[in-house]
Amino acid sequence: MALDDAVVLDLRGVTDKTAFMDRCVRALPLPVRFGRNWDALADSLADLREPMAIVVTGWHAYAEAEPDDWAVAQEVFSAAAATSRRGLAVLLSLGGWEDRTSATSQGSDDPTAVSRAPDVGE
């Protein structure tokens, strides 16, 4: 497993659990029957067939909008990494990975909706 081969879970614009699960479905190799709930996510990540590194980017707005759900998401990532049969690493990007010149509009899960990201100090 190499960071060069990491899967990016981009959460820019995600501000609720439904949008979070939608992004997981799009970015991660989850089963077709994935139940879009915390238990299903934990089980699916722990049962991945190949070693994987997941880099979670753009998560700050979700963490601010839904702190309890974000805490659960972190617990799910941690438990899945600890119990993974093949090897799983989940890394939270503190910035710099994603393109800082544009971001998906707040509250939207539409990847075509783009707005300007604020500069530091704005």
Image: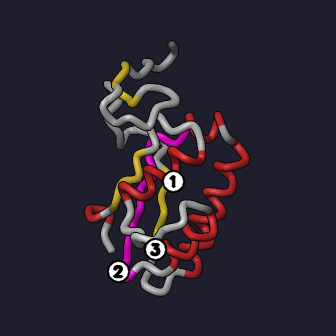
| Residue 18 falls inside the magenta stretch | no
**Residue bearing mark 1:** 21
Rounded to the nearest whole Å, what is the CA distance between mark 1 and mark 2? Answer: 21 Å
Mark 3: amino acid? Leu
Of badges 3 and 1, the one in the foreground is: 1
Q: Is mark 1 on a helix, strand or loop?
A: helix
**Residue bearing mark 2:** 50
Residue range highlighted in magenta: 49-60
Which is nearer the N-term, disc 3 or disc 1? 1
Does residue 82 sit above or below 59 in this rendering? below
Which is nearer the N-term, disc 1 or disc 2? 1
Residue 43 placement, left or right of 95: right
Q: Residue at horizontal 55%, vertical 47%?
A: 18
Q: Residue at horizontal 54%, vertical 73%?
A: 81
* Residue 65 screen position, x and y as percent: 64, 34
Residues 74 and 108: in front is 108
Does residue 80 sit above or below 97 in this rendering? below
Local crowd size for mark 3, using a 10 Å CA cut-off: few (<14), some (14–19), many (≥20): many
Rounded to the nearest whole Å, what is the CA distance between mark 3 and mark 1? Answer: 19 Å
Q: What element carries label 2?
A: loop
Rounded to the nearest whole Å, what is the CA distance between mark 2 and mark 3? Answer: 9 Å
Does residue 51 sit above or below 22 in this rendering? below
Which is nearer the N-term, disc 2 or disc 3? 2
Q: Is mark 3 on a helix, strand or loop?
A: strand
Which residue, as the protein is rendered here, is positioned at the far left? 4
| Residue 56 falls inside the magenta stretch | yes
Of badges 2 and 3, the one in the foreground is: 2
| Quadrant showing the N terminus | bottom left
CB atoms of marks 3 and 1 within 8 Å: no
**Residue bearing mark 3:** 88
Q: Residue at horizontal 35%, vertical 29%?
A: 100
Exactly how many numbered labels are in the figure? 3
